[in-house]
Image (spheres, grey):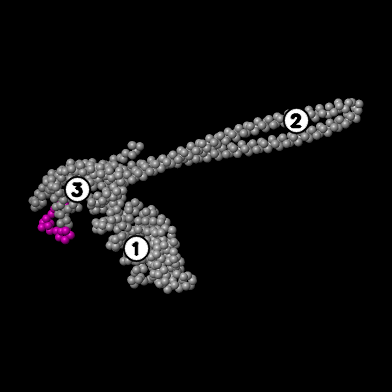
Amino acid sequence: MVKTFKPPVVRKGKLVVVDLAGSERIDKSGSEGHTLEEAKSINLSLSALGKCINALAENSAHVPVRDSKLTRLLRDSFGGTARTSLVVTIGPSPRHRGETSSTIMFGQRAMKVENMLKIKEEFDYKSLSRRLEIQLDKLIVEHERQQKAFEDEVERITVEAQNRISETERNYADALEKERLKYQEDYMQSIKKLEEQWVMNQRKHGSERTTFELKDDNFDKALNRVVPVASAAEEISELKKLLQNEASLRTATEEEVNNLKSQVVQWKRIEAAGNSEILKLRKMLEDEAHQKEKLEEEIAILQSQLLQLSFEADETRRQLDRGESGKVLGNLDSFVSQIRHSQLSDSGNGDKASIAKLFEQVGLQKILSLLEAEDADVRIHAVKVVANLAAEETNQEKIVEAGGLSSLLMLLRSSEDETIQRVAAGAIANLAMNETNQELIMSQGGISLLSITATHAEDPQTLRMVAGAIANLCGNDKLQIKLRGEGGIKALLGMVRCGHPDVLAQVARGIANFAKCESRASSQGTKSGRSLLIEDGALPWIVQNANNEASPIRRHIELALCHLAQHEVNAKDMISGGALWELVRVSRDCSREDIRTLAHRTLNSSPTFQTELRRLRIEC
């Protein structure tokens, strides 16, 4: 088990090949227009690179790596942990002597920079997790196979015992019936024989009496008694033999039945032992599943800590370059011990603290840059960090200004990982609580992306996040036409296929927000005509779930009904769709007084509803 849980070590590296353009003088090159602007940008990048080289060559306390994109790209190549080779190219023309000398001086300064080569090794927790999952699946399959074989064996033995018992009982009953019939037949035949002998004896006795009248009467009587008594004794001996045989057969049958009963009792004991073994195996499986969950949680925590430690390593390298090695190593050791202590004490508080510390030390721009990383695990953890930051209202403006919204929409468009889609949709839902962010989401095609994600997703949690984001956008009066045009209402109604209460609650909230905005626009005179919800076919689902058992779904649907009923154009559709009866029920039986009052006021203010109620003789 120790070898199994030891994660393998993976070595990682990268190759950066940069073609540095030569610095040129504008008066010599004569560049104009776009070429001039390009030359300025090249000179600025080379100037920033020269400043970094000078600072490293002079052991300066500050290295301006962030001044240019080029220096940020090459930060590991000078003064870092990479092996760096610099090829300087010059020309022999005396006309460009100044450029040639500056290039040679740049090479001389660059030669003074020393790099500390380091092999980057990481623990491959992903492969460890995959190997543990394979082992767990094998154990589960083996256990199921053994359990099925044991159950089949027990069932076979039980069926065989029952068949043998029934066969023995049937044979015993048949034997008893045959013996009874045989004894009855023998008894009747013996009675018949006795009667015939008695008749013959009577006749013989009569003839002898007529022939030998002179013989003694006592002798005749004794002769008549001897013959039937001898025949009866023979019959009795035969009957005794038959009874003895029957008794022996019965004893053998009883012994066989007792043996079968003892076998049944033994099989029941074996079955009880098998059931106890099954319970032990189930308990072992539960323990394995619990251990797997703990390992997954530990892997997630370790991955987040690895991400954090990578950023801490960057800070450590910079401090090492400034000559503060002892202090930095001490801080790093204390930081690692704090992480372990927080992991043992409280994992939830540790995650929040690590995210806050990561945001403070690393910066939002670097976190957002990890959303485009090639490693899927890094992208997942980065988008989780962004989602947690987006939950705070103070961070939302910073995320949007730094391009986080565009990155999240890009992830939603390009990624096929459902975990990334779920967390990205949750972050967009948090950002959509701000009205300014809602307009940005709409302008960047967010509704179309959310609708496509809702169409392809199957996970209830992903659908809940997408539905929550669309529901927040439904509460903006200015975006209703565009939201409907890009399929927002269709996406909401399509997600009801999931049937999950949380998803249905978000769908109901979005419909209520949309209906409220429509009602406000109708009262202000900026909108006319039927509700867009009714045109898109939302009314049947609203009526069907108006009395849903879940209180969040029912409350939002009741509000949506009241807002739809406030516009007179929707009255006929609501009557034909059965919504009038639900409005009457809401006005009478709703648990919330404000919704009940709103429904009652809406029914009384609509002439079409009043006419229909009078026709149906319903008092409201």
**304 over 539 or under it: above or below:** above
Q: Secondary structure at mark 3?
A: loop
Left or right: residue 99 compared with residue 440: left
| Gap in angstroms between the C-alphas marked 1 and 2 | 108 Å
| Gap in angstroms between the C-alphas marked 1 and 3 | 46 Å
In the image, residue 28 lies in the stretch drawn in magenta = yes
| Gap in angstroms between the C-alphas marked 2 and 3 | 123 Å
Q: Residues within 10 Å of mark 1 (few under 14, many from 20)?
A: many
* Cβ–Cβ under 8 Å for marks 1 and 3: no
Figure label count = 3
Q: Which mark is residue 474?
A: 1
Q: Amino acid at mark 2?
A: Glu
Mark 2 lies on residue: 235
Q: Earlier in the sequence, mark 1 or mark 3?
A: 3
Q: Check the picture and name the quadrant holding the N terminus.
A: top left
Q: Residue at x 79, y 33 (%)?
A: 194
> Can you give x and y, in whole percent of width and height, for residue 240 in the image?
71, 30
Q: Residues within 10 Å of mark 2 (few under 14, many from 20)?
A: some
Q: Amino acid at mark 3?
A: Arg
Q: Secondary structure at mark 1?
A: helix
Left or right: residue 292 compared with residue 216: left
First to last magenta residue range: 20-37
Q: Residue at x 59, y 37 (%)?
A: 165
Q: Check the picture and name the quadrant holding the C terminus.
A: bottom left
Q: Secondary structure at mark 2?
A: helix
Left or right: residue 138 compared with residue 234: left
> Can you give x and y, in whole percent of width and height, for residue 109 in the image?
12, 46
In the image, residue 108 lies in the stretch drawn in magenta = no
Q: Which mark is residue 75?
A: 3
